[in-house]
Image (tube, rainbow, N blue to C red):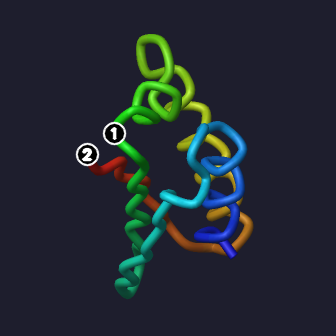
């Protein structure tokens, strides 16, 4: 569910939605969601001063609270 949410938001932001890759590493309490986009789309996902990335992390935090889990978003280069 959380992985699909991040994938949807990222594909909506970038120019090359076919190059968006999202993977989820699950632990007992925490899951790490890794987001990888094309090099030219990295700035769009991060945003000015990291605002877009922070907004995505906020959305993820709210959704993971509802799922009673802790989630961390990592944007890979």
Q: CA distance from mark 2 to mark 1?
A: 7 Å
The answer to which quarter of the image holds residue 13 is: top right
Q: Nearer the viewer, residue 61 or 33?
A: 33
Q: Residue at x 48, y 12 (%)?
A: 48
Residue underneath mark 2: 77
Q: Residue at x 43, y 65 (%)?
A: 33
Q: Residue at x 36, y 47 (%)?
A: 75
Quarter of the image where the C terminus is located: top left
Q: Nearer the viewer, residue 13 or 68?
A: 13
Q: Total marks drawn?
A: 2
Q: Nearer the viewer, residue 21 or 15?
A: 15
* Secondary structure under the numbered disc 1 in the rendered image: helix
Contact between marks 2 and 1 (CB within 8 A): the answer is: yes
* Secondary structure under the numbered disc 2 in the rendered image: loop
Residue underneath mark 1: 39
Residue 53 coordinates in the image, percent (x, y): 49, 33
């Amino acid at each position: 569910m959380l992985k699909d949410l991040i994938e949807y938001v990222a594909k909506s932001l970038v120019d090359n939605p076919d190059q968006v890759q999202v993977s989820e590493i699950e632990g007992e309490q925490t899951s790490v969601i890794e987001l990888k986009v094309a090099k030219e789309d990295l700035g769009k996902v991060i945003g000015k001063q990291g605002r877009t990335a922070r907004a995505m992390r906020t959305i993820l935090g709210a959704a993971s609270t509802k799922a009673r889990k802790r989630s961390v978003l990592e944007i890979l280069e």
